[in-house]
Image (spheres, rainbow, N blue to C red):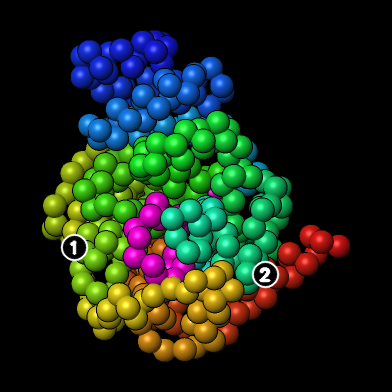
């Protein structure tokens, strides 16, 4: 396999893309400390300039998965596991929608391993808001597995479970622009989740990410981007969606469809009316300045407060329940999520997570 320096030379002189195996080997060389800062910055800049391919994104995700600390779960446990990790970085200042959706989906019967981090460009990341709610965040792999079994939910804190990524953090900060890691990170769930709702910051990357998911063997996933720029399913207008269904699942609908070797990828537009939800404005979905304030927003939703914030959490929870095979369609998923909130099941889930956190401190 060519070295990273040789691959960079071929990219610069031949304008060629990397194969999946070359991309995997290149990142392995980077994360194990064999590559220099200039070479790393050169590769990331080259990808950002011309755009990544699905094979390059897949290879990077595979290398990151190989070096992550795995959460010790059985194959049966992984088969039913859902993630709602997205790219973040949409710059819209909303509250923690995907985190709320993950907890609602859990209370509605899903098993959720939410991969995430602290806020970087946002006011409050998923780790920040969960920590403010008293939910355990920085768990070991063994603690993560125990938390999932005890509560149906676990948070996978990326810095704790992917320590090799420390090698590239200073370079990413110095570059100051989005890199392939912003797309690859959400594809590397350390618990091996096979179902996912992944919001992304750019609609132009939907098929890129979906085709990488297909190569990575996802069972069922939705890659989503709102017409308002949200990296979520939105209520302000239509959302662009790429649905990935594994070889064992049959694609539905007559929308644009492409067939990959591993899965079917279907691209379509989704309006909130299809889930029988009213439209809203971005201002109605705004987040707060602090983690405590954003936690209060989620707790208000879980306490039954009506309105657009509740609705957008239900919409995204419904997609997660569909990906996990629990809901038949979006309306069914919305109904299941609403029942989980109104019955108090979501608060019971949060209480169980707080109890788990307290037991860890004993």
Measuring 27% from the left and 79% from the top, which residue is drawn there?
281
> Left of 272 or right of it: where is 96?
right
Classify 10 Å Cα crowding around label 2: few (below 14), some (14-19), many (20 and above).
some
Mark 1 surroundings within 10 Å by alpha-carbon count, few (fewer than 14), some (14 through 19), many (20 or more): some
The answer to whether one can see residue 14 in this image is yes
Circle 1 residue = 269
Percent position of residue 177, x then y: 35, 42
Position of residue 210 measured from the top left corner of the image (x, y, whole percent): 30, 46
Where disc 2 sits, the SS reads loop
Residue drawn at the location 24% of the way across and 66% of the way down: 228
Which residue is denoted by mark 2 in the rendering?
Answer: 134
Does the magenta-highlighted stretch encompass residue 82? yes
Give left or right: position of 139 versus 288.
right
Q: For the point 27% across and 18% down, which residue is it? A: 11
Which is more foreground, mark 2 or mark 1? 2
Q: Is residue 282 left or right of residue 79?
A: left
Q: Which quadrant would residue 253 be assigned to in this image?
A: bottom left
Viewer-nearest residue: 233 or 251: 233
Q: Compared with residue 292, is residue 269 higher up or lower down, i.e. above or below?
A: above
Residue 292 part of the magenta segment: no
How many numbered marks, from 0 up? 2
Residue 124 drawn at (x, y percent): 51, 64
Q: Is residue 335 above or below residue 67?
A: below
Q: Earlier in the sequence, mark 2 or mark 1?
A: 2
- Cβ atoms at labels 2 and 1 below 8 Å apart: no
Q: Position of residue 351 (x, y in %)?
A: 67, 75
Magenta extent: 78-98
Q: Relative to 185, is 286 above or below?
A: below
Circle on res. 327: none
């Amino acid at each position: 396999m060519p070295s990273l320096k040789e691959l960079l030379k071929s990219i610069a002189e031949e304008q060629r893309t990397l194969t999946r195996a070359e991309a995997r080997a290149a990142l392995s060389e980077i994360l194990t400390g064999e590559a220099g800062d200039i070479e790393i910055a050169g590769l990331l800049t080259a990808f950002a300039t011309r755009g990544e391919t699905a094979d390059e994104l897949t290879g990077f995700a595979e290398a990151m998965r190989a070096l992550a600390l795995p959460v010790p779960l059985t194959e049966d446990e992984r088969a039913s596991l859902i993630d709602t990790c997205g790219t973040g970085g949409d710059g819209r200042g909303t509250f923690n929608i995907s985190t709320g959706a993950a907890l609602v989906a859990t209370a509605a019967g899903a098993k959720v391993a939410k991969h995430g981090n602290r806020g970087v460009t946002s006011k409050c990341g998923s780790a920040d808001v969960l920590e403010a709610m008293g939910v355990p965040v920085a768990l070991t792999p063994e603690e993560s597995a125990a938390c999932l079994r005890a509560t149906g939910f676990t948070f996978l804190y990326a810095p704790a479970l992917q320590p090799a990524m420390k090698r590239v953090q200073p370079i990413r900060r110095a570059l100051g622009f989005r890199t392939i890691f912003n797309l690859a990170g959400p594809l590397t769930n350390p618990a091996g989740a096979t179902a996912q709702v992944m919001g992304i910051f750019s609609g132009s990357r939907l098929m890129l990410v979906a085709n990488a998911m297909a190569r990575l063997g996802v069972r069922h996933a939705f890659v989503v981007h709102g017409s308002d720029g949200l990296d979520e399913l939105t209520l302000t207008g239509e959302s662009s969606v790429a649905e990935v269904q594994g070889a064992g699942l049959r694609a539905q609908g007559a929308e644009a469809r492409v067939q990959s070797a591993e899965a079917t990828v279907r691209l379509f537009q989704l309006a909130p009316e299809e889930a029988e939800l009213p439209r809203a404005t971005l201002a109605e979905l705004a987040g707060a300045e602090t983690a405590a304030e954003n936690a209060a927003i989620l707790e208000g939703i879980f306490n039954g407060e009506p309105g657009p914030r509740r609705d957008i959490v239900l919409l995204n929870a419904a997609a997660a329940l569909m990906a996990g095979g629990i809901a038949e369609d979006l309306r069914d998923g919305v109904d299941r999520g609403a029942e989980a909130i109104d019955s108090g099941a979501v608060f019971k889930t949060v209480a169980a997570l707080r109890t788990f956190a307290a037991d860890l401190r004993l």
